[in-house]
Image: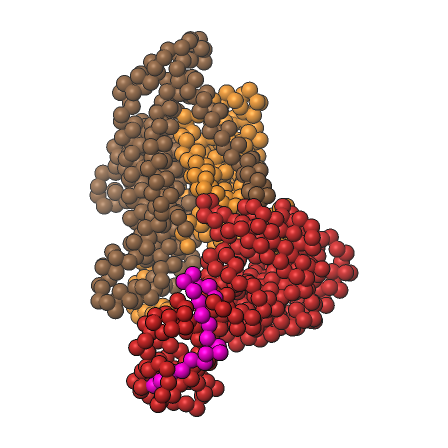
Chain colours: A brown, B orange, C red
């Protein structure tokens, strides 16, 4: 529904964004691919020549590789499961009539504004510290031995911190979706004799389907890239090394650019698998 | 039509919601409270909730130790600059997608979004090299560009969903009324989309403000924003909870206040226009 | 001036040709109505004239000059949209002034024209309001005001009344007709409502599947429909289109007879039938009569005084002078 004139205008107006993103994607990607076939140690001799697929083989055969994939999936999956399920419950609660709804919403949304470095530091020191942390006090109060959260239960701890950061996001999107549910539908179901559980299962949950896909899509994008939370809390120790973090260590800590780049290519492949999978669902769900 | 709810149910709802709300907010509240304690009170056993000697000492220590104003200024420039630049580039693109859609529009949009999934670590070193070559390392401009690029897909997507709600007939009316493309975007589309643009702006300022990979890895002393300021507190040195809390409060306060004031626009922005 | 000529114009969306080659001339000062069922291509045709869509082939000229490739802003036409398409962030005054501002007219002249339009359209009291604060009818007037201040070569209306309620629609219909008489500017008006077409048009263009079925004055179309489609589309209630042996008696595939051209009697007549539902409008009564001779019931118009009970036996007699005959292709005979 447009003229030749407006179509060519559209192409011109789209160009800057497309060209910038294309450059942003292709230039570093090409460089990463280039380095991944080299033995390249900037601090120990620099460019030591082509090595074929050596880096790729070494990266996968390193004992840290599979655990890092596992860790990545546990963190992403765990956070998604917690935020979506708690988010649905919280959204339903916040949708009920109450006093001070606006203030409660402000309280719930707050963690989203906290930068990851701050939340990681605060959780690590003031809550999860085995000597002075608030959780340690709580455990002692009940006569239990304080847990050394970030070493004994490192992965669940990180999942918890990240879930705290993302729960507001999930809740708010789901709340907005619930508010758009036509109450006549629920009343009709009630007239048809559906008990509350069934009304939730057959009407509320399907209505939230689209919102849940949005939550999953957006959060996955950000969760795959989690960095500060691990950097600040465990530094990748105690089984919290995600694929991203492993590559980060190869590149920055051991300054092995070739190996790190090969890892980067793996990470890009993993991200693309997830992306294709998500885009399929979302593309279908977002047709509006 | 909302039905009348019994008073009792409303009381239960209120109690439950406030309880959970406060629980979620508690870590922030605790941080703010601790920032006004002395270091000894901060680790007192049992913990002191309100009955402590309120002090501003931690804030002055933090101010002395690091140049808070410069970090803050860097954060403002980087978050604000990258977002504004992103919006300027995204508005025309979103206009094209929303009002002159083609068969490929959706694919382009999805492709843009997929660039967001490129793992940053995968390209850290190349970007690092490029930055050295271009003299962008540890500059605000460099971070403005990078954060603009990583948020551009989200900005385009959000603006696209907002623009799509504007009836095309209004833009056609402007065209019939003799408006050029520039007039159409400037005098008709943009003013009509102000709420959507505001939401986009706010959300992306927050995302850029809190971004902690590129800001930590591409800056040193000069251009470091608040994420780096706070990261310098990651290694404990003696009694430091109160000071850590003061620094944390100072890092999150600006965005927390901004976020609370603009809650309404934000909620609509947060849903990325995908949920109504 | 505002003579618009379409020469072998076609339009395709992808592989689908929505408008096969089409010729049409709209004379200066004429009130032309494009009418047809939804999806017949009438709005597309209007948008082609406006320049909001490109023609796939052919030529559009305005006042003799080829404007086929001219962007909408430069064609000197004004359009009133179905949704009114007012700028919600501007006051009524700014809305009406917008085309003048785009033309870089000086402020004094803009003010003069806006005030002029406002007084013609009874909008003087609302100039500082936003569109959101106006009723449907007032919004419609603002949209018209925005069109008339430009003093265009022609006005294009795209189903402008379809969002108004029935009572307002009748009023606005009169206002637009009145405006046309006063301005004597060419107007092209798209509607799916044949009543609007009949009451407003100098010339009606009946469209069906992108093809012009007939062009003519309202009464020409009413009296001499060129084919069964026009016959069935123009007039309310619809013309009775009848097939079968009775039609063959008149040497036609189909015969058409309007409800007012059928006599109804309890005693004698050509076709025997049974009364179904009767609709009493006060001034007239419409009977739906099921005749054995025909597959579908006939609609018959009778005086408002006449009553007949459901299921009563009646006889119908067509007025032969007003009987329309159509051939196998649905084209008019004789």
Residue A169 vertical position relative to residue A65 in the rendered view, above or below: below
Tell me where residue B16 sits by quadrant.
bottom left
In percent of width and height, residue C200 lies at: 59, 71
Q: Tell me what residue is drawn at x 52 percent, y 70 percent.
A: C224
Q: Tell me what residue is drawn at x 34 percent, y 70 percent.
A: C244
Instruction: Give the quadrant of the N terminus of chain B.
Output: bottom left
Residue B86 visible? The answer is no
| The stretch drawn in magenta includes residue C319 | yes
Instruction: Identify which residue, B210 or B148, lies in the foreground.
Output: B148
In percent of width and height, residue A36 lies at: 39, 18
Residue A181 vertical position relative to residue B199 in the rendered view, above or below: below
Instruction: Identify which residue, C25 or B108, lies in the foreground.
Output: C25
Q: Tell me what residue is drawn at x 43 percent, y 39 percent.
A: B107
Q: Tell me what residue is drawn at x 46 percent, y 52 percent.
A: B268
Position of C119 with respect to A33 (left or right) is: right
Give the magenta part as a residue range.
C314-332
Tell me where residue C124 sits by quadrant.
bottom right
Instruction: Give the quadrant of the C terminus of chain B.
Output: bottom left
| The stretch drawn in magenta includes residue A104 | no
Residue C112 visible? The answer is yes
Instruction: Identify which residue, B75 or B18, lies in the foreground.
Output: B75
In percent of width and height, residue C309 lies at: 33, 88
How many labels were placed on the picture?
A: 0
In percent of width and height, residue C177 lies at: 62, 71
Residue C222 vertical position relative to residue A174 in the rendered view, above or below: below
Instruction: Identify which residue, A33 or A280, lies in the foreground.
Output: A280
Position of C314 with respect to C301 (left or right) is: left
């Amino acid at each position: 529904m447009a003229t030749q004139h407006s179509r060519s205008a559209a192409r011109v107006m789209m160009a800057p964004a497309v060209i910038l993103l294309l450059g942003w994607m292709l230039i570093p990607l090409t460089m990463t691919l280039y380095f991944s076939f080299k033995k390249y140690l900037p601090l120990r001799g620099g460019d030591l020549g082509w090595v074929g697929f050596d880096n790729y083989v070494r990266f996968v055969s390193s004992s840290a590789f599979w655990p890092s994939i596992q860790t990545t999936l546990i963190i992403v999956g765990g956070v998604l499961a917690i935020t979506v399920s708690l988010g649905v419950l919280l959204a339903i609660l916040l949708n009920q009539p109450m006093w001070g709804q606006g203030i409660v919403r402000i309280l719930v949304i707050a963690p989203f504004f906290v930068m990851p470095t701050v939340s990681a530091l605060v959780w690590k020191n003031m809550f999860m510290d085995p000597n002075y942390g608030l959780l340690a006090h709580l455990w002692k109060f009940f006569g239990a031995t304080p847990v050394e959260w970030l070493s004994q239960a490192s992965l669940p701890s990180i999942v918890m911190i990240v879930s705290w950061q993302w729960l507001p996001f999930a809740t708010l999107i789901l709340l907005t979706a619930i508010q758009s549910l036509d109450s006549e539908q629920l009343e009709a179901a009630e007239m048809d004799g559906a008990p509350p559980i069934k009304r939730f299962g057959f009407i509320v949950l399907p209505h939230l389907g689209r919102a849940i896909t949005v939550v999953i899509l957006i959060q996955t994008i950000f969760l795959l890239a989690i960095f500060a939370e691990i950097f600040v809390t465990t530094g990748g120790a105690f089984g919290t090394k995600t694929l991203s973090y492993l590559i980060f260590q190869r590149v920055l800590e051991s300054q092995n650019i070739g190996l790190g780049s090969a890892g980067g290519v793996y990470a890009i492949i993993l991200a693309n698998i997830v992306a294709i999978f998500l885009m399929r669902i979302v593309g279908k769900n977002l047709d509006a | 039509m909302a039905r009348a709810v019994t008073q009792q149910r409303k009381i239960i709802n209120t109690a439950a919601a406030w309880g959970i709300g406060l629980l979620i907010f508690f870590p922030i509240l605790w941080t703010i409270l601790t920032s006004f304690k002395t270091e000894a009170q901060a680790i007192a056993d049992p913990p002191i909730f309100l009955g402590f000697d309120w002090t501003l000492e931690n804030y002055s220590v933090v101010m002395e130790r690091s140049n808070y104003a410069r970090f803050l200024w860097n954060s403002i420039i980087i978050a604000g600059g990258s977002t504004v630049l992103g919006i300027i580039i995204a508005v025309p693109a979103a206009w094209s997608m929303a009002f002159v859609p083609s068969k490929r529009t959706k694919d382009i949009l999805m492709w843009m979004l997929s660039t967001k999934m490129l793992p940053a670590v995968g390209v850290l070193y190349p970007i690092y090299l490029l930055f050295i070559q271009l003299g962008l390392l540890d500059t605000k401009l460099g971070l403005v560009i990078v954060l603009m690029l990583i948020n551009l897909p989200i900005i385009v997507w959000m603006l696209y969903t907002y623009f799509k709600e504007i009836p095309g007939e209004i833009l056609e009316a402007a065209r019939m009324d003799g408006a050029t493309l520039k007039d159409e975007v400037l005098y008709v589309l943009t003013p009509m989309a102000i709420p959507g643009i505001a939401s986009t702006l706010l959300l992306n300022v927050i995302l850029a403000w809190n971004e902690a990979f590129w800001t930590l890895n591409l800056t040193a002393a000069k251009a470091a924003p608040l994420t780096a300021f706070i990261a310098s507190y990651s290694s404990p040195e003696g009694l430091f909870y109160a000071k850590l809390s003061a620094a944390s409060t100072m890092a999150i306060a600006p965005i927390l206040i901004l976020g609370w004031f603009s809650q309404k626009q934000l909620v609509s922005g947060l849903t990325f226009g995908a949920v109504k | 001036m505002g003579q618009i000529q379409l020469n072998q114009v076609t339009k395709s969306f992808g592989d689908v040709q929505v408008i096969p080659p089409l010729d049409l001339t709209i004379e200066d000062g004429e009130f032309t109505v494009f009418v047809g069922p939804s999806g017949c291509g009438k709005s597309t045709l209007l948008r082609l004239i406006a320049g909001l869509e490109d023609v796939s082939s052919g030529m559009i000229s305005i006042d003799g000059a080829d404007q086929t490739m001219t962007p909408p802003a430069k064609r000197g036409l004004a359009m009133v949209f179905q949704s009114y398409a007012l700028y919600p962030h501007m006051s009524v005054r700014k809305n009406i002034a917008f085309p003048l501002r785009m033309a870089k007219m000086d402020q004094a002249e803009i003010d003069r024209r806006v005030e002029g339009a406002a007084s013609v359209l009874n909008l003087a009291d609302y100039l500082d309001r936003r569109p959101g604060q106006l009723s449907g009818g007032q919004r419609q007037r603002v949209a018209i005001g925005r069109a008339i201040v430009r003093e265009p070569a022609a006005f294009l209306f795209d189903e402008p009344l379809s969002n108004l309620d029935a009572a307002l629609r009748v009023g606005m219909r009169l206002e637009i007709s009145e405006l046309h008489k006063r301005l004597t500017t060419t107007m092209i008006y798209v509607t799916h409502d044949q009543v609007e077409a009949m009451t407003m048009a100098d010339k009606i263009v009946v469209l069906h599947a992108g093809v012009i079925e007939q062009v003519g004055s309202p009464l020409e179309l009413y009296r001499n429909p060129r084919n069964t489609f026009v016959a069935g589309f123009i007039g309310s209630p619809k013309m009775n289109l009848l097939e079968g042996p009775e039609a063959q008696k008149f040497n036609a595939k189909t015969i058409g007879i309007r409800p007012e051209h059928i006599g109804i009697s309890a005693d004698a007549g050509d076709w025997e039938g049974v009364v179904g539902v009767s609709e009493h409008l006060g001034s007239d009564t419409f009977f739906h009569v099921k005749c054995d001779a025909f597959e579908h019931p006939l609609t018959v118009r009778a005086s408002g005084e006449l009553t007949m009970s459901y299921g009563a036996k009646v006889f119908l007699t067509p007025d032969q002078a007003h009987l329309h005959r159509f051939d196998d292709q649905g084209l008019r005979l004789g």
